[in-house]
Image (cartoon, rainbow, N blue to C red):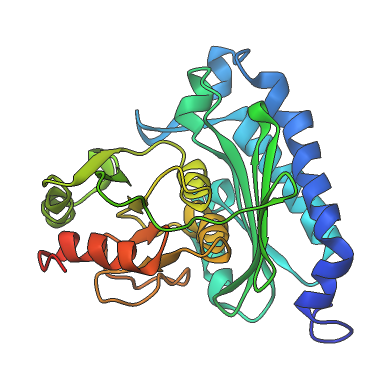
């Protein structure tokens, strides 16, 4: 158990590869066999037509819950589908035990429509700090990993986000309007200005990966669910990027953030985007 016989860093030295193997195996067993082969009875709505869940989501999360718990005795798993069934599960993020934060299929809507823009997200956190993350785009066989203080990597190659190129529009992936309040919609309208090119986001995990790769300048998201953000935010940080809420503080996976918030290729871009969202335009 972490804290008794080893630290999280020591655990990661020994088992980060085992976590990656578990993520790949979950996708191979439960996600890829259903990709572009979903039957109607394998797809359900949760809160509405834009909030879908499939047998791939449910079964992959069960697979990962068992595999990750076995790798780290004493840890707990907070998965999107488990929280949907029992919201009290989410409280483990604020507890003392190491917590695995799992989104089995991030981008379920894309998955259902046969688009390869989905991924599996796993993060290991404790006391609100994300220590490591795994982002696996199964249909593309791309695995991005990050360890706090150890860098971000895509298929073994180091990621550096770098600042946006000067003189071109800032590209920003934004929340879908269905998931924003009226106040958040007004804040996001600040991005519709000269020099900025906003667009609707796809899979949050893949948008974070795009920021870490320097292919997307920033995001502007309006919801707090840790399974969508924990893995990607560490990936962006370790690639040299930054994330900020409207109060100028980094995003907290434990909640209570001022929204919308941004993750960006560098700190200057993060400040620029939050300025546009808050109306201060730095």
Q: From the viewer's perspective, is residue 167 above or below residue 233?
A: above
Q: In this view, does 274 lie to the left or right of 73?
A: left
The residue at the far bottom in this view is 4
Residues 229 and 235: in front is 235
Query: In this view of the protein, which residue sits in the foreground, 72 or 162?
Result: 162
Q: In this view, does 74 lie above or below 216?
A: below
User: Is residue 275 among the parts visible in the rendering?
Assistant: yes
Residue drawn at 79 percent across, 51 percent down:
66
Q: In this image, 83 relative to 224: left or right?
A: right
Q: Is residue 174 visible?
A: no
Task: Report which quarter residue 29 is drawn in.
Answer: top right
Q: Residue at x 18, y 66 (%)?
A: 275
Q: In this view, does 67 lie to the left or right of 52?
A: right
Q: Residue at x 35, y 50 (%)?
A: 165
| Above/below status of 227 relative to 54 | below
Indicate the quadrant containing the N terminus: top left, top right, bottom left or bottom right.
bottom right
């Amino acid at each position: 158990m972490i804290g008794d016989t080893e630290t999280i860093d020591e655990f990661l030295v020994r088992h980060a590869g085992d976590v990656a193997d578990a993520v790949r195996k979950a996708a191979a067993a439960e996600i890829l066999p259903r990709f572009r082969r979903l039957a109607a009875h394998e797809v359900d709505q949760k809160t509405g037509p834009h909030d879908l869940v499939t047998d791939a989501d449910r079964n992959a999360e069960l697979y990962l819950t068992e595999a990750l718990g076995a790798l780290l005795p004493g840890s707990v798993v907070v998965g999107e589908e488990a929280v949907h069934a029992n919201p009290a599960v989410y409280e483990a993020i604020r507890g003392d035990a190491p917590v695995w934060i799992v989104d089995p299929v991030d981008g379920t809507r894309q998955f259902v429509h046969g688009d390869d823009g989905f991924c599996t997200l796993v993060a290991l956190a404790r006391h609100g700090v994300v220590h490591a993350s795994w982002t696996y785009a199964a249909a593309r066989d791309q695995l991005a990993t990050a360890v706090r203080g150890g860098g971000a990597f895509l298929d073994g190659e180091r990621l550096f986000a770098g600042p946006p190129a000067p003189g071109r529009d800032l590209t920003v992936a934004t929340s879908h309007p269905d998931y924003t309040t009226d106040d958040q919609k007004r804040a996001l309208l600040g991005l519709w200005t000269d020099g900025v090119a906003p667009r609707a986001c796809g899979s949050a995990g893949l948008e974070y990966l795009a920021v870490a790769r320097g292919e997307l300048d920033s995001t502007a998201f309006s919801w707090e669910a840790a399974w969508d953000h924990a893995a990607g935010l560490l990936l962006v940080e370790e690639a040299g990027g930054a994330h900020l809420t409207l109060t100028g503080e980094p995003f907290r996976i434990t909640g209570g953030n001022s929204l919308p918030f941004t993750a960006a290729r560098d700190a200057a871009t993060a400040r620029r985007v939050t300025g546009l969202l808050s109306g201060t335009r730095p």
